[in-house]
Amino acid sequence: MVHYRYLLIMPCLPLLVVAITLANTDSAATARAETPTRAENWPHWRGPLENGSSSTADPPLTWSEEENVRWKVEIPGRGGSTPIVWGDRVFVLSALPVGPAAEPETESAATPAAAEEPRDATAEPAPQRGDRDGRGGRGDRGGRGGRGGRPRFGGFGGNARPTQMHQFLVIAYDRHSGEKIWQTVATEQVPHEPGHGTNTFASSSPVTDGQHLFVNFGSRGVYCLDLDGNLVWKRDLGQMQTRAQFGEAASPALHGNRLVVPWDHEGQSFLTALDTATGEPVWKVDRDERTTWATPLITEHEGQAQVITNGSIVRSYSLDSGELLWQCGGQVENPIPSPVRIDDQVICMTGYRGNAIYAIRLDARGDVADTDSVAWTRFDAAPYVASPALHDGRLYFTKSRDGIFSSVDAVTGESVISQQRLTAIRSIYASPVAAQDRVYVTGREGTTVVLRHGPEFEILATNQLDDGLDASPALVGDRIYLRGEKHLYCIGEPDEEASDESDRESE
């Protein structure tokens, strides 16, 4: 028997359902418009998947200074950081010289905002070790100077201490027009080390959760800003003393409400997790590592988030507590490439004065070198500066800093393409990226070679810009964002409407 109250309600149900549906549709549309998904953006310097790949982007195949450049803007100062993209904005970091320091022989003071907080007394700098590699050691020659104005040789650390005051900038550009939306000075300081001649004082890349930007200027501080450029918090972790004064470059890693900052240098190295809302340290663990420049990978496995750091020893820590979960030796000198994950294993690699690639199972525990927890290894080729790209089960990487291209099956380590030379590229700092059926490899001289994703070595296009390119590309929608020595480029094919209008005007 149907109760009379339900009889009264039933005629209203269709209208109610329609109203609720329309309301939910409007809310969903608003949410989509206001909150773009991670996959549709480039929130981390290695992309939405943190492996150099995009599942949604469909970037152009060809470009030059005269073709498919949607816009090009000059960036103040210098920086090697990769642009990140969220919504309608592109974010970049830079260091701008603004004049000599008042007292060159003393360490500069920070801006009043940065000076409010004392340095972390637990970050003890080590005594200077001197330039043990002469002017940087063997193999530290950079690109051969190209159209982008790169130095013929790389330049090295151990030069005279900087005396110029620098503004450390965070800049937002409109993704569609290139118009500068805002520019924030995080701090003004005189860098305490000269850095490698190919490094910059803004080589770490920002990361975003879609609401805030997190920026690591290293010895100049860690900063959180909202997407309108307003400072939310800052944290001073001390001062690094890097190997041969090569400078700093590691980017922070973000997961949930934790920002993980690596601090490997010639003093007491450590890894710390900061609360994203306040910047307060959640935990800090000391590390037995010399200087590294690798960004950690944070990934979840069996309900536990792991922070995986590359180094002479690869280590995994609990994101919750900082507890060491496992470690594996075997990497070679100067670790820079960031780890990537495939299924239930993580892949780490180094390529300076040797080559090493290790795939390690995420359920490992303890010291796992020479155990079954190492899924596979390779020692024939590995990148020095660039990180690998992982796309549809294939791992793409270059050898040392040379234009020598390889790919392997990421699950098994079996070779797919073995050490093919990219004749148009002589030296590489930028990491390869991939989308659709294409892999993009960018050289320091401004050249990007596009290869077909697949089992065969096939070059689809070779593209040249006038600016030197060290930062890795960012792929969003049908565009590529390239940060050069002096300019930020937006690469994309013309809109059909704009092309039609241009055709009508020409008629």
Image (tube, rainbow, N blue to C red):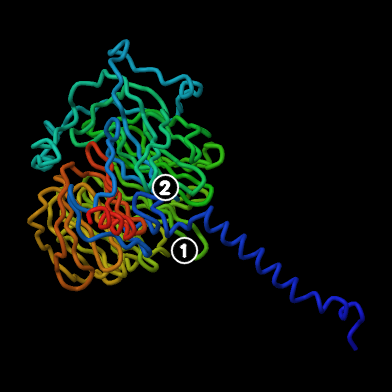
Give the x, y percent position of residue 340.
Answer: 33, 59
Disc ID at residue 301? 1
Residue at the front extreme, as displayed: 507
Residue that appears at 31% across and 65% down:
374
Q: Helix or strand or loop: what does disc 1 sit on?
A: strand
Q: Residue furthest right?
A: 4
Examine the rendering and report whether any part of residue 252 can be seen. Answer: no
Q: What is the x, y in percent for residue 280?
A: 54, 36
What residue does disc 2 label?
253
Identified at 52% across, 56% down, the residue is 33
Q: Nearer the viewer, residue 259 or 40?
A: 40
Q: Amino acid at mark 1?
A: His
Q: Residues within 10 Å of mark 2 (few under 14, many from 20)?
A: many
Query: Measured along the vertical axis of the image, is residue 264 above or below residue 97?
Result: below
Q: Identify the element where label 2 is drawn.
A: strand
Q: What distance separates the C-alpha of mark 2 from that of mark 1?
A: 17 Å
Q: Position of residue 249 (x, y in %)?
A: 30, 39
Against 423, residue 117 (above or below) is above
- Is any atom of residue 148 visible in this view? yes
Residue under the image location 42 percent in, 60 percent down: 365
Residue 201, picture quadrant: top left
Instruction: Report which quarter residue 348 is drawn in.
Output: bottom left
